[in-house]
Image (tube, helix red, strand yellow):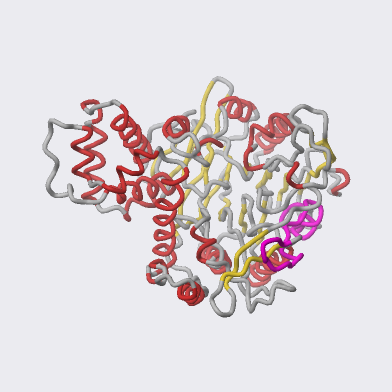
Amino acid sequence: MNQIYRIAVIADPHVHDVAWQPAGAGLAGAVRSWADTTASTRVFNESLPAFRAALDRATAEGARIVIVPGDLTDDGQRHNIEVAVALIAEYERRHGLRVFMTPGNHDFWALKGRPQRKEFVGRDGSRVIVGSHAAPGGAVSSPETAMLGAPEALTLMADLGFQPRTDDLHFETPFGSDARWSSRTVRAASPDGTTGFDMIDASYLIEPVVGLWLLSIDANIVAPRDGATDLDDPTQMLDPSDGGWPAVLRTRPYLFPWMCDVAERARRSGKALVAFSHYPVLDALAGASALECALFPSSGLARRAPTVEVARRFAETGVRLHLSGHLHVNDTAVFRDEWGGFFNIAVPSPVGFAPAMKLLDVATDHVRLRTIRLDDVPGHDAAFDDYSREAGAAGDPSPKAVSAGGHLGFLDHHLCALVGARYMVREWPRDMAEFVRAHRFADLERLLWPQATPAASTGNVALTVLAEDWYRLRKAADLALDLVPEARLAVYRRWIGELHHAEAADLAGRFIAFISLLGRYLDRIPTLDVALDLEALVAAPSQGRTLRRQTV
């Protein structure tokens, strides 16, 4: 009989403890400011309640194994790591839950860490900047707020799969069975190969229960820049979030034959194999990142999409299922060519829109995949009074997000704030952003179809609503469908269907590309309840209807 293993996947929890009192900062707690929060793609103060809610849901669903594909903490601070690890230990004691993780770009930095500079809410609502090292500009200094280096951080997180337990049935690394960090180092070289240092590769294969193999790939590559002269200077390191799997190809090519060997041994011995790393191996934006980069060249997410070469090399390993985090998006992608194929499951974060986790029922040849939205998180509002006090001290109204109702509503407001203050400002062509801010649906229809009469029922809707819906569907796929009224979805689908009649020059052409991308986001492989056939590489809803295959 084919054994089924239930696994919960919680990506990018970014744990930050608001009860923390950084030494020397003079703060009653470590509440990050609303100003900092609205400048970030994730929220901070809600992270610990959200992680607890996700763990609660995992245990309620009967999962006893949890995978965290990186970014366990806010920014690799010792206190936040210790709090996250203690919470996980609590759930193991109470529920028998065991957590396995892989490193992310927010978990540590190189060998010795790097400085951090954060803004907190003071006792009187003022914004207090705290720096971990020298703190210019009137900032308060608190060394314990720094991000740790890999050896120290991995030692604190060792029990999350990085080191074996006596009752584990199997454990190995790409270098053998010796789990000591000193036996798991590899040269991290600059792109030109002239500078480098020895860095831990934290990859591992573990069998925690009979028949289940978990393959954690450390794709978080920290390496020096070309010409680096001081390897203790964090500014002379390449940002691992810009590297992803292409950096794995360049710096850790030995991982691919190891993965190939693992997959073959799993097949021969009848093991269910689940691989995971922090970064996606396939384009997690509905396969449309190249189109998005053409429209928005500075798009932070789209420009980090992995290459076709990465997909082909991964397919050659025979690993059929890979879980990823990092982008805080919800996506299912599949690649297939003459070398093989695999699924990449991009897992959303509990602290970004739309907050969610994944639940997998895994067998050797098939997986049932469910995406569970975390609409309500007990305690998520712990910092709301601080946000209001901060706004009052700055002479601003209280943020609308604090009255949104529920964790999902809060993060939806946060996303809408990002659309107006970050994405449209940093990434959009100026003429597009100005048109959206000043016009309505009917105006866009006149621009694209000047000979047609705009629909009266929706024509008066502000175009900023279109921009917000575009990002909802881009990030969350079908998790966001019930948040967009059916009348608006009908308008979008009508526009998508009529694009071949639209004016295509200049500004109109850019909006055609924008709406075409929206069509891609609406036409993804569903994620809410899907069966994945790991042999045929076909995704089907639970009713059994075969779905379109998305390839690179």
Residue 510: quadrant of the picture? top left
**Residue span colored magenta:** 135-162
Front-most of 168 and 347? 347
Using residue 356 as the reference point, say whether residue 400 is left or right of it.
left
Front-most of 89 and 60? 89
- The number of numbered badges drawn on the structure is 0
Using residue 162 as the reference point, say whether residue 34 is left or right of it.
left
Is residue 176 among the parts visible in the rendering?
Answer: no
Q: Residue at x 69, y 43 (%)?
A: 220
Q: Residue furthest top?
A: 338
Q: Position of residue 100 (x, y in %)?
A: 67, 54
Q: Position of residue 437 (x, y in %)?
A: 31, 48
- Using the image, determine if residue 219 lies above or below residue 422: above
Q: Residue at x 18, y 43 (%)?
A: 442
Is residue 22 among the parts visible in the rendering?
Answer: yes
Q: Residue furthest front?
A: 137
Q: Position of residue 135 (x, y in %)?
A: 72, 62
Q: Residue at x 68, y 50 (%)?
A: 210
Using residue 372 as the reference point, say whether residue 27 is left or right of it.
right
Using residue 376 as the reference point, say whether residue 451 is left or right of it.
left
Q: Quadrant of the N terminus?
A: top right
Residue 312: quadrant of the picture? top right
Front-most of 469 and 422? 422
Q: Position of residue 59 (x, y in %)?
A: 56, 65
- Using the image, determine if residue 299 lies above or below residue 370: above
Residue 148 in the magenta stretch? The answer is yes
Front-most of 358 and 171? 358
